[in-house]
Amino acid sequence: MTNAFTRTTSRTVTFAHPFALSGVDGVQPAGSYIVETDEELIDSLSFPVYRRSATWLRLPHSNRGMAMEQTVLIDPDELDRLLEPAGNAALLPG
């Protein structure tokens, strides 16, 4: 059953160097990206608490000259490691 009390927050992250993520084809170019986080309200408590349920990254995508966007499900812990100082190059292949 889906929780009726969900929220989505957005933030912009900036990668100083090209990066790669598990489950995403290829190396992504350096730049700014939008990260969206879906959270569900835990309603069994007497105060509002949200639990992260999914994290999404919007990737630019070009198809025959048309600018489009692709949204991919990502591991938030992997994203955090990439955003750490010097972590930006840690997960690049090779």
Image: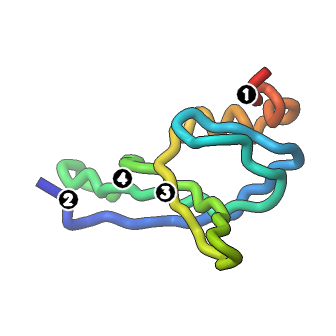
Q: Please, what secondary structure does the residue beneath circle 4 have?
A: loop
Rendered location of residue 39, percent (x, y): 38, 56
| Camera-nearest residue between 44 and 13 | 13
Query: Going 18% across and 49% down the picture, which residue do you hit?
Result: 44
Rendered location of residue 32, percent (x, y): 77, 61
Label 3 sits on residue: 37
Q: Are marks 4 and 2 in contact (CB under 8 Å)?
A: no
Mark seen at residue 34: none
How far is disc 2 from disc 3 in space, using C-alphas?
A: 15 Å
Q: Please, what secondary structure does the residue beneath circle 2 have?
A: loop
| Camera-nearest residue between 12 and 63 | 63
**Sequence-wise first label, 4 or 2:** 2
Badge 2: how crowded within 10 Å, few (<14), some, or many (20+)?
A: few
Residue 53 located left or right of residue 73:
left
Q: Please, what secondary structure does the residue beneath circle 1 have?
A: loop
Label 1 sits on residue: 91
Query: Going 41% across and 49% down the picture, which residue do you hit?
Result: 54
Residue type, mark 1 in image:
Leu
**Sequence-wise first label, 1 or 3:** 3
Mark seen at residue 49: 4
Question: Depth-wise, is mark 4 or mark 2 nearer the camera?
Answer: 2
